[in-house]
DNA sequence: CTCCGTTCTTAATCTACATTAAGTTTTTTC
DNA sequence: GAAAAAACTTAATGTAGATTAAGAACGGAG
C-alpha cells in the first residue's frame, strides 16, 4: 500500500518503520475516473495530492469559458493549489483527472500534524516544494523566452510519451495558444 | 544583527536562543551596490539570498541581448535560482541588485547542515518554498489570463510603491512586453 | 553647471497568433 | 452499430504587441 509514494519519499529522506506506519495511517487513497474533479473553482482546497498512477490537470476557466491549463501532474508528482491550501481561500482552479487515476490524498490538517511529528517528512516536503518552485521558475522563463512554435517543439521533444497520452487541445492550452494554431503547427511539421 | 530575518522566521516558527545563536553563526551579510551581481549566467548558484533591505532582480538575457526579468525580490523575500541551487548546475540567470541593498546569504552547504540540526528551520524553509511556489502558480495564471495592458494595471494597483522604485523598462521586462509598449500604455492612461 | 550615457517617448510598419466559422474525423454512448 | 458528442482541421480575416528608428528628457559624474 502506498508503495509509489513511500519509494518517492525514500529517494530524498529515510524513514523509520514507525514513521512509515504513522504516515500510512494518515493517508487516504482516491481513484478518480476520467474527468472527475478533486476540487473545483470556488472551493477551498483542503489537501495535497500525489499521483501514484494516471494523470491530472490544474486549470482555470476565463470569463469567455476558455480553459487554460496551468499544470499537469503525472506519476510521482504532488499537485494542489498552494495558495488556496495555505491561506485557506477559495481556489480559482479546477483539479481534474485526465485519465482514471490513483491519487494519494494528504489533508492539510493532517499534514500539519504529521510534519510536526516527523522532521524527515518536513524535510521531504521542503525538498518537493523547492523542486516544484525551481520548475516553475524555468516555466516562467520558457513562457517569455520561446515562441509558441518553439514551446511546442521543446515540449514534444522533452515529453514524447506524454504527448501521446493527452488530447491535443490540452497540449495547446498548456502551451498557451489555441487548438487551431497547434493544428497549423502540426500540419507544418508533416 | 540579522533582525529582519529573525523577525521573518518567527512569523512562522519559534526558535530557541540556542537555535538563533547557531543560525546567526552560519549567516553572512553582503551589501551589493546598485547593479552589482550576486551571481551571473553560467555560474553554479551556491546560496539562497534574503533581502533585508533594497531590491534585487533575477533575469536572463536572450540571444539578441534582450533582458527578461523572471522575478523581483524586495524586503523579506528569499531569492535564488532553485534549480541551479539544488542540482548544482550552471544557472541561466543573473541575480543583480537594482538598488544598493543589504542581503543575508545562506550558503547551500551550510543550509543543508543547519536544517538537519533544526527542525524548526526545516519547517520555516518548507513554508517559504510553498509560498513562493503558490505565488509562481498565480504568476503563471496571470501571464496567460491577462493582456499586457491588464497585467500593467493589475501590477501598478497591487504594488504602487514598488513601481516608483524601479525603472520603467524593468517593469516592462517583468510584465512581458517592450518598453515602447509600456510607454504607449502610460500615454493612454493620462 | 554641464556633458554624456541612460531612460523614456512617439510613430510607422510588421507579424505571430487569435477569432470566427465551417467542415471532417474520432470517440463515446445507448 | 447508429447517433450524438467530442476532438481536430482548414482558411479568411483581425489585432495585440514587436520592431525599427529617431528624438527628447533625465540623471549622475566630474
Image (cartoon, coloured by chain):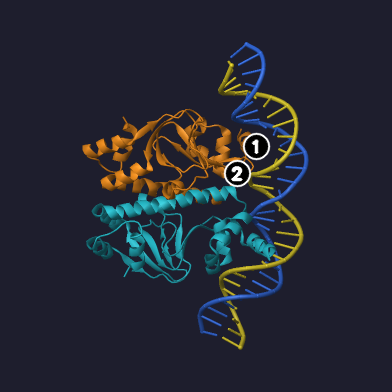
Chain colours: A orange, B cyan, C yellow, D blue
Q: In the image, A1: left or right of B58?
A: left
Q: In the image, B124: left or right of B63?
A: left
Question: Mark 2 — on which chain does it sit?
Answer: A
Disc 1 crowd, CA 10 A, few/some/many (<14, 14-19, 20+): few
Q: In the image, A66: left or right of A117?
A: right
Q: Using the rendered image of the protein, determine whether residue A98 is visible from the camera's viewpoint.
A: yes
Which residue sits at x=58%, y=64%? B169
Label ID, residue A180: 1
Label ID, residue B46: none
Mark 1–mark 2 distance (CA, rounded to whole Å): 18 Å
Q: Nearer the viewer, residue B162 or A178?
A: B162
Residue B59: percent from the left, percent from the top?
Answer: 49, 58
Question: Mark 1 — on which chain does it sit?
Answer: A
SS at circle 1: helix
How many circles with numbers are drawn on the protein?
2
Check the image and report above or below for D28 versus A73.
below
Question: In the picture, residue B179 is in which quadrant?
Answer: bottom right
Residue B154: percent from the left, percent from the top?
Answer: 58, 57
Q: What residue is pinned by disc 2?
A: A62
Residue A125: percent from the left, percent from the top?
Answer: 34, 46
- In the rendered structure, are the residues bearing label 1 and label 2 in contact, judged by CB atoms less than 8 Å apart? no
Which residue sits at x=65%, y=62%? B180
SS at circle 2: loop
Sequence order check, earlier mark of 1 and 2: 2
Residue A35: percent from the left, percent from the top?
Answer: 51, 30
Amino acid at each position: 500500500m502506498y508503495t509509489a509514494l513511500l519509494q518517492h519519499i525514500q529517494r530524498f529522506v529515510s524513514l523509520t518503520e514507525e514513521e512509515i506506519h504513522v504516515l500510512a495511517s494518515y493517508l487516504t487513497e482516491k481513484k478518480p475516473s476520467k474527468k472527475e474533479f478533486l476540487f473545483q473553482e470556488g472551493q477551498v482546497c483542503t489537501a495535497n495530492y500525489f499521483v501514484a498512477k494516471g494523470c491530472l490537470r490544474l486549470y482555470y476557466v476565463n470569463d469567455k469559458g476558455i480553459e487554460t491549463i496551468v499544470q499537469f501532474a503525472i506519476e510521482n508528482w504532488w499537485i494542489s493549489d498552494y495558495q488556496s491550501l495555505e491561506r485557506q481561500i477559495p481556489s480559482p482552479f479546477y483539479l481534474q483527472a485526465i485519465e482514471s487515476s490513483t491519487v494519494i490524498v494528504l489533508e492539510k490538517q493532517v499534514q500539519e500534524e504529521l510534519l510536526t511529528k516527523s522532521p524527515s517528512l518536513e524535510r521531504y516536503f521542503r525538498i518537493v516544494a523547492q523542486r516544484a518552485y525551481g520548475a516553475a521558475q524555468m516555466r516562467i522563463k520558457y513562457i517569455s523566452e520561446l515562441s509558441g512554435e518553439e514551446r511546442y517543439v521543446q515540449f514534444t521533444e522533452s515529453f514524447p510519451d506524454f504527448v501521446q497520452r493527452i488530447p491535443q487541445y490540452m497540449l495547446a492550452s498548456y502551451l498557451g495558444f489555441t487548438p487551431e494554431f497547434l493544428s497549423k503547427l502540426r500540419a507544418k511539421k508533416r
